[in-house]
Structure formats: structure tokens, C-alpha cells
């Protein structure tokens, strides 16, 4: 048995179901919450355009997207940065902490210079990152529809599910724009929004690549045996990120009938890219990497290379990009850095996205 396989063996991970729908049902009912299928129409309005953005290298559109559900409508802003001089371009759909373009996590000029576009939103503009009891906005409308569909109270969607669902509605709009194709769209987020990107990618197979930066506990990291943050910590401080059912696994992680590699494996056969930081011990870089190792057989079962790695933990500064699962670990702490963005674009360039 290889070293990495022995590392997984000692964790006694639950076996993943072969059926992807069963996998999704488990993760949504037990961890993130259920958003049922529903009628939803969308109307977009461009409210501002900067045609000289980034010294004229890009155009920046501010777009108001109005979503109309059976119970009402909700409008939020999104920001579309388009590189100039390209008939087609790969697109990042970004859940960000701020609506600003650029901001500390979003080095937009470097991204544009490499030929990528970005459709971004500030997550608080969609649903507040707070225990607001879902009394207004999109959270109210989505939970209302879930209740009408007889979703049990303990399985009603938390904020991560709501933000993830919104990323799919942004993709709906993006795919109707000139130069954008589903074959070159990647959903991306950092930390809690890295968890969001993973769930969006699981639920919507139109995303050709799913990118998770430092998503840690309840994201890319295996929970069993993990150092740093655990289910008890995250559900105590941020219970509203998840469905209420998830709290039952606080201090009882060995009883979970699922693991986080299920979230990653459900993305197969598409591309997945996960990143960690050496000093980000709360997120648990070793277990983020083990999540990729454990998920790799889902690609291999489809005749694809999953995670191509030496039989050891990667070293800081090392980037793995040969398989369908990319992974890198950098020096430093919990952050979405320029180095991370460049590693993600290196991975996609290596997969032929710049054509």
C-alpha cells in the first residue's frame, strides 16, 4: 500500500455512493441544505460601463440582475470584466467578499493580462453573511420555495447553498454573452466562498472547472482526523452557513455518513483545482490535499487521471497540474493571493483554455 493510501486508510472514510444523485442528496440534506427546482426568470440591466478599464485593456460592466421567483423578485449587482481584443475568452465566475473591482482578493489587471474575464459579485449583496433569520432578500425567497416544496425544517438551505445557487444564475447570464462558452467557465471562491464554489460546481455541471482556495472545514478538507477547525467550531460560530441538520455532527464527526471527498468527487469528470497555504492550520492544508487524494478515484473510474502526485505530501511552492485535479500549496497564511490566481491560470492554460 502506498504512503498516501495508508494515510487515507487510517481515517476510515465512508464509502461514496456510485450514484451521483445519491451523493448530492446526502450532502444537501445533511450539510448544506436543499434548494428545490423552481421557476425562475431573470432580467439583466447594464447600469454602468467603463470602456477604458485597466488602462483601456478591458471593459467593466456593472449589471443589475433581477431574479423573479414564484414568491417575488430580488435584484443584485454583478460586475463583468471583459478583456479586449479577444473573440473568445475563458471566464471566472467569482463569489467575492467585496463588490469592488479590484480588491485585495481580486487582482483583476493581472487576470485580464493573462486573457481571462471575470464575472463577480459581492456575497453580502446576495444574502447577508449573518444570522438574519432569512427575513428578506433572496434567502427569504429561496427558503420560502423550499418550505412550499415540503423540505423539512432541518434541511432548509443555509447561506452557502444560497450563494452557490446564485452563482448558477450568474452563469445563466454569462453563457448568453459574446465570447463566453460553458467549456471554459470556472467557478471560484476563497474560504467560506471556496466552500460555496465547490457546492456550486457540484450542483451545476455546466461549470467546466471548479476552484476552491483555502476552503478548509466543510469544504475541501477531510473532516475525520483533521487539525484546526472542526464541525463543532464552524456550526457554533456560523450555523447559518449550513442546514440545521449539520449541527448534529458537532463533536460526532465519526458518525457522519459522508465525507468532504464526496463534495470533490461529484465534480468528476470536469476539472477541479484546490489550493492550500502552509501556515493556514485552521483550514488544515494536509487534509485539503487528502480530500483530493480521496476523490481521485472518481476520475479514474471514468478513465481519466485524477490527482497526479508523488507518493507524499506536497512541498510549499509545489503545484500539481498533470491530472484532472490540480493542487498547489504556497507559503504563508489564509488568503487568496496573486500567486494563487496565477497558479489557477497556469492549471487552466495547461489544460488548453487559451485557444
Image (cartoon, rainbow, N blue to C red):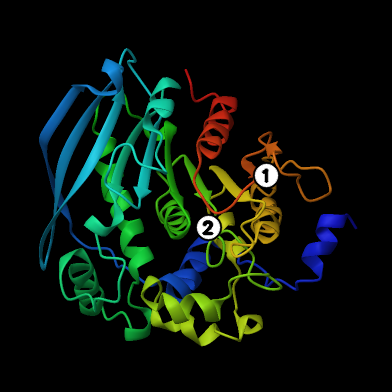
- The secondary structure type at the circle numbered 1 is loop
Pointer 2 and pointer 1: residues touching (CB < 8 Å)?
A: no
Residue at image point 62% right, 50% down: 277
Pick the front one: 134 or 113? 113
Residue placed at 26% from the left, 34% from the top? Answer: 80
Distance from Cα at disc 2 to Cα at disc 1: 20 Å
Tell me where residue 166 sits by quadrant: bottom left
Residue located farthest toward the top when viewing the structure as drawn: 85
On the picture, is 220 further left or further right than 169?
Answer: right
Left or right of 241 in this view: 286: right
Compare marks 2 and 1 and give the one earlier in the sequence.
2
| Circle on res. 316 | none
- In the rendering, at what x and y percent does residue 288 appear? 64, 57
Residue 274, position as x, y percentages in the image: 58, 48
Q: Secondary structure at mark 2?
A: loop
Tag in front: 2 or 1: 2
Q: Nearer the viewer, residue 24 or 250?
A: 250
Q: Does residue 264 appear anywhere in the picture?
A: yes
Quadrant in the picture for residue 329? top right
Q: Position of residue 302 (x, y in %)?
A: 64, 45
| Residue 19 spot, x, y in % from top left | 55, 62
- 136 vs 267: above or below: below
Residue 215: mark = 2
Q: Which residue is mark 1?
A: 306
Decide which of 36, 329 is in the foreground and name it. Answer: 329
Picture layout, residue 42 above or below residue 182: below
Residue at the image point whose x is 48% and y is 55% from the top: 198
Q: Quadrant of residue 249?
A: bottom right
Packing grade of label 1 (10 A; few <14, some 14-19, many >=20) is many
Amino acid at each position: 500500500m502506498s504512503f498516501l493510501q495508508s494515510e487515507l486508510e487510517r481515517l476510515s472514510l465512508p464509502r461514496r455512493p456510485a450514484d451521483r444523485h445519491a451523493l448530492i442528496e446526502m450532502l444537501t440534506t445533511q450539510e448544506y441544505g436543499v434548494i428545490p427546482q423552481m421557476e425562475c426568470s431573470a432580467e439583466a440591466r447594464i447600469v454602468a460601463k467603463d470602456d477604458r478599464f485597466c488602462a483601456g485593456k478591458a471593459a467593466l460592466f456593472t449589471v443589475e440582475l433581477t431574479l423573479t421567483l414564484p414568491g417575488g423578485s430580488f435584484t443584485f449587482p454583478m460586475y463583468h470584466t471583459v478583456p479586449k481584443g479577444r473573440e473568445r475568452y475563458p471566464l471566472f465566475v467569482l463569489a467575492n467578499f467585496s463588490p469592488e473591482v479590484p480588491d485585495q482578493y481580486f487582482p483583476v489587471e493581472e487576470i485580464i493580462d493573462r486573457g481571462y474575464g471575470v464575472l463577480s459579485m459581492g456575497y453580502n449583496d446576495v444574502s447577508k453573511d449573518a444570522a438574519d433569520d432569512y427575513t428578506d432578500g433572496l434567502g427569504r425567497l429561496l427558503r420560502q420555495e423550499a418550505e412550499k416544496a415540503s423540505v423539512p425544517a432541518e434541511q432548509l438551505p443555509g447561506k452557502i447553498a444560497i450563494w452557490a445557487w446564485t452563482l448558477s444564475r450568474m452563469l445563466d447570464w454569462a453563457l448568453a454573452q459574446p465570447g463566453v462558452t460553458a467549456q471554459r467557465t470556472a467557478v471560484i471562491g476563497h474560504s467560506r466562498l471556496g466552500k460555496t464554489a465547490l457546492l456550486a460546481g457540484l450542483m451545476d455541471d455546466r461549470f467546466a472547472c471548479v476552484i476552491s482556495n483555502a476552503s478548509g472545514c466543510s469544504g475541501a478538507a477531510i473532516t475525520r482526523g483533521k487539525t484546526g477547525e472542526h464541525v463543532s467550531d464552524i456550526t457554533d460560530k456560523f450555523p447559518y452557513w449550513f442546514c440545521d441538520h449539520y449541527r448534529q455532527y458537532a463533536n460526532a464527526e465519526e458518525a457522519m455518513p459522508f465525507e468532504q471527498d464526496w463534495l470533490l468527487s461529484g465534480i468528476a469528470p470536469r476539472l477541479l483545482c484546490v489550493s492550500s497555504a502552509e501556515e493556514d492550520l485552521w483550514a488544515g492544508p494536509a487534509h485539503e490535499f487528502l480530500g483530493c487524494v480521496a476523490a481521485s478515484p472518481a476520475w479514474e473510474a471514468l478513465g481519466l487521471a485524477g490527482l497526479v502526485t508523488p507518493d507524499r505530501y506536497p512541498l510549499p511552492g509545489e503545484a500539481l497540474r498533470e491530472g484532472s485535479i490540480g493542487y498547489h500549496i504556497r507559503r504563508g497564511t489564509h488568503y487568496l493571493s496573486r500567486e494563487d490566481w496565477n497558479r489557477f491560470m497556469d492549471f487552466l492554460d495547461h489544460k488548453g483554455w487559451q485557444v
